[in-house]
Image (spheres, grey):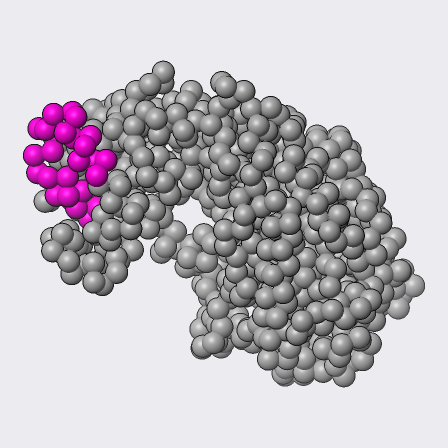
Amino acid sequence: MTGWSRRSFLGAAALVAIHAAAPSGAEVLRRLDSDEEPPPHCRMLMRQVADLVIPDTDTPGAGAIGVGDFVLVGLAHGLEGTRLPPKAELAAAPSFAPYMRKDGSLDHAGWLEAKLGQDWLSQSPARREEILVALDAAAFKGDPTAAPWRAIKALILTGYYTSEVGGSQELNYELVPGRFDPKVPVKPDTRAYSSDWTAVDFG
Amino acid sequence: MMEKGSHFDAIVVGSGITGGWAAKELTEAGLKVLLIERGRKIEHQLDYETEMKAPWEMPFRGEGNADLYAREYPVQRLNRHFTEFTQGHFVNDAQNPYQTGPDTAFTWFRSYQLGGRSLTWGRQSYRWSDYDFGANKRDGHGTDWPIRYADLAPWYDKVEEFIGVSGAAEGLPQLPDGKFQPPFALNVVEQAVRERISANWPERRLTIGRTANLTQEKDGRGPCQSRSICARGCSYGAYFSTQSSTLPAAQATGNLTLITDAAVEKIDYDPKTRRVTGVRWIDSKTKTRYQATARLVFLNAGAFNSVHLLLNSASEALPGGLANSSGVLGTHIMDHANTLSAAAIMPGFEQWTTFGNRPTGVIIPRYRNMDAMDGAGHTRGFSFQGGALQSTWTAGKREAGIGADYKRHLQKPGPWRMVLVAFADCVPRATNRLTLDRTKVDANGIPQLHIDFAFGAEENAALAQAKADATEMLTKAGGHVMFGFDRPGPGGTAIHEMGGARMGHDPATSVLNKWSQAHDIANLFVTDGAQMASSACQNPSLTYMALTARAAAHAVSLLKSSAI
């Protein structure tokens, strides 16, 4: 992740907008100057990670629809608090220090690549999943050295469930319900509504 | 643009919730009115740019650019209605600075545009009762209101019938019933909690939030579509805003002149006649200064900005500011002490969900310190708002898991939760006040507002009791309480900032008389939140509107009898 800086995403809003129209990464890259592109291996890693969190089922998974790139853009712009300084004791820890930016924030993508291991992408699918499951478990058990994963995972969920596929195929989407039904039976095929904004905000 | 020397019967400063009402009432009475708005023009329907967009059509999927928000919207981003969809309906904090005292934390949420905060408000619409109008007299905080519920009841009727308020009549003296459209329904959990609370505490009532969202078509406005994205703007006109309701009425009279991008800096005053004569403003785009004259001025800039304008209109004749012979201008500001008292998991309802997004929650009106003084360490009331909701995919951010099973888990409606958020009465205090910081100016060279504000023992005691009560109620209703708080958020959190130009009997201790009319200046009216002498513990906007309509009628009668 060396050489990938905040400046890399000065045009990030445009980048994400392009995602909406065309999730293809190649389309994104054509709109960026060559020195602003995240390195291909970084994009590949985040795509693979996102796809392990939300894989293909009866609907496409996160990898195929560009969630990895959304995560990189989100990290560049501080979504999920990722441009805020981590606790001082963590910032000085060996696993964090190499990835601290000048503004005091952590380069989450660089940290993740190191945390998973430099050869993670070349591991077998089963091994990749095993490593990620371990990181996820550690983060949610409160291991501070795994804590940044929680923000990355949150961005994967946001990237997926606010996409057209995640929001309107995996879940239901109805911008104009037209009525409020206070008591509806849950059936085996009931899917939540991504347009239930109260649930999204406060659930 | 305004011709030099333009003259009107009345000038209304501010086009938000009360400014729209003032413009409507005064124009319908036949007055030629100039309505001045500091922000940009937003046309109903045409300019609600994000209203129909899905998250995937937004650059940051509705989450917004956190980096930008940290730099330029550090306060506004804390508003629960602030999103990437709605950010254009809130001020840029960096461009609209204000100052606070060293011990003050105050989040001042603002919307500088045509319609003001009527576009972004929470729409909860409650009458105040005599427990509220009598509060200051009863416990000695602040000064007595010169009006009681009976003075305002017909004006509440008028306002509710015009704006459209949905709600359920409950017959409660502390939250008088109004002229309601049919209510939204309680969901299955809320209905059960209502019944269980009533069974344990007959004096406590959970009811649907009374909201200015139509459930029936009204005057060309469509009923609510249960989207609950109101702050984006609503092309159906289903919630009350200046754009959907009062502005079209005022424009239909042919008596309204509207200007936008016009920041009023001073009100002109003639010491010989002791009357205001007009206002001066700066065109925000060209920085050109203009003025107009009028027989009557209504201030509706929002509580703090109306006070700011009165202070900034100081002159050689009135060095303390306009209408400030009492010296209390700017003092006794309030906001509800607001916190999440309890959040609980509500088991037993997993087989049920809902369809559609109801644009309101529930309310449990005050029940403490009514006829018996049963508040522990406080003399006033608190009420709860909140509701029952299901979690969804965002709960996955707090859970371990990856893969297909995790994805299937997030596909289903999540567990039911219920939250009760307390709004506690805020005691009026002289030390909570607004002043001008003449060492710091805004982009127009106008001194910035300085806010000193702190809650005290009364509010802390009320919220402690609210937390205990909320925990007990949700537990007896079958919930498992996860957490709750007993300290208020920063001032401004409730977005009910009010006071600073309080109404009162005595010109020596108050700024306005019972008609929202300045004691000192007969042709000056302040009818937004600045006029409030106490805060009650329910949302104040409906009361501001009723007071505005009442004041406008009085002003018109004075004008027509040449008394002003």
Residue A41 found in image quarter: top left
Apparent side of residue B543 relative to residue B73 in the rendered image (left or right):
right
Is residue B114 placed above or below B143 in the rendered structure?
above
Residue A86 found in image quarter: bottom left
Residue B153 found in image quarter: bottom right
Is residue B409 placed above or below B362 in the rendered structure?
above
Image quadrant holding the C terminus of chain B, namely bottom right
Residue farthest to the top, as pictured = A58
Can residue A80 be seen here? The reply is: yes
Can residue B263 be seen here? The reply is: no
Is A187 included in the stretch rendered in magenta? no
User: Could you tell me which residue is drawn at 60 percent across and 24 percent down?
Assistant: A185
Q: Which residues are magenta?
A: A107-134
Front-lying residue, B191 or A80: B191
- Does the magenta stretch mainly form a helix, a strand or a loop? helix
Front-lying residue, B414 or A149: B414
Front-lying residue, B375 or B503: B375
Apparent side of residue B476 relative to residue B173 in the rendered image (left or right):
left
Q: How many marks?
A: 0
Residue A14 in the image: state x and y as whole percent: 31, 35
Apparent side of residue B432 relative to residue B373 in the rendered image (left or right):
left
Is A127 included in the stretch rendered in magenta? yes
User: Could you tell me which residue is drawn at 25 percent across and 28 percent down?
Assistant: A52
User: Could you tell me which residue is drawn at 42 percent across and 34 percent down?
Assistant: B393
Is residue B86 placed above or below B444 in the rendered structure?
above
Residue B123 in the image: state x and y as whole percent: 66, 46
Residue A29 in the image: state x and y as whole percent: 20, 29
Front-lying residue, A197 or B548: A197
Residue A123 in the image: state x and y as whole percent: 10, 28
Is residue B303 placed above or below B345 in the rendered structure?
below
User: Could you tell me which residue is drawn at 29 percent across and 24 percent down?
Assistant: A55
